[in-house]
Image (cartoon, rainbow, N blue to C red):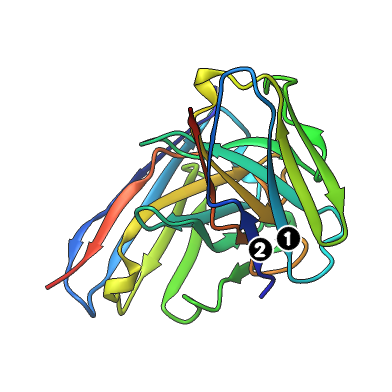
Amino acid sequence: EVKLLESGGGLVQPGGSLRLSCAASGFTFADFYMSWIRQSPGKAPEWLSFIRNKANSYTTEYNPSVKGRFTISRDDTQNVLYLQMNTLRAEDTAIYYCAKPERNWADYFDYWGQGVMVTVSS
Amino acid sequence: DIRMTQSPASLSASLGETVNIECLASEDIYSDLAWYQQKPGKSPQLLIYNANSLQNGVPSRFSGSGSGTQYSLKINSLQSEDVATYFCQQYNNYPLTFGSGTKLEIK
């Protein structure tokens, strides 16, 4: 059974940093590109970033809305996906999901974690 | 960025009815389109990919169609468990983008 479990969320002041983690199990994590997606309450999801697999040199893509502030990374030995978030703003307040693509290179997602809340407020 | 315009924003229908949700892309996305269902407090669930391919385990009353810039999700024989918000997502170009959602309720 595929499981994705995010952690590391919480309340942070504007300008602060957080690192989110996503522990994956039930599939060959190392083979799959993995993404972070966020969703503000009552809004549509917003794709943030993905990281390719080792065969594709762990290259990354970012939404311009977070490029330069957020960094995606992965540890295939521990089956964990990370999102380092710096210089956080009030508009970064959202539920953050990690998501697995339906095929290892695909850009649509058949499994999402339960999400972790990030609140940016003073 | 490719803009996905979804309509209607909300929809109320009776049990057993057929409903259609539309998604218009700001440019040709060559059928690189997925549909998701999101129930309150839950993560989105994949229904359809490649515009018309049904994800494993999804009831056959869900179907997708379209090409170019115009796509639709059809739900036949509406069931109470279909109450949810539905989103389209394009994956033809980065950044991946989602429609604004359609909230489906039972009349």
Outermost residue to the left:
A122
Task: From this view, report whether residue B43 is shown above or below residue A56.
Answer: above
Tag 1: Cα neighbours inside 10 Å, few (<14), some, or many (≥20)? many
Rate crowding at label 2 as few (under 14), some (14 to 19) or many (20 or more) other CA atoms within 10 Å. many
Disc sitting over residue A111 in the figure: none
Labels 2, 1: one chain: yes
Q: Is residue A2 left or right of residue B77?
A: left
Q: Position of residue A40 (x, y in %)?
A: 37, 58
Q: Is residue A69 above or below residue A21?
A: below
Query: Along the line of sight, which residue is nearer the eye, A44 or A99?
Result: A44
- Circles 2 and 1: CB atoms closer than 8 Å: yes
Mark 1 or mark 2, which is nearer the start of the sequence? Answer: 2
Task: Please tell me in which quadrant of the rendered image residue A60 appears.
Answer: bottom right
Per the image, the residue denoted by label 2 is B4
Disc count in the image? 2
Q: Who is closer to the viewer here, B29 or A113?
A: B29
- The residue pinned by badge 1 equals B24
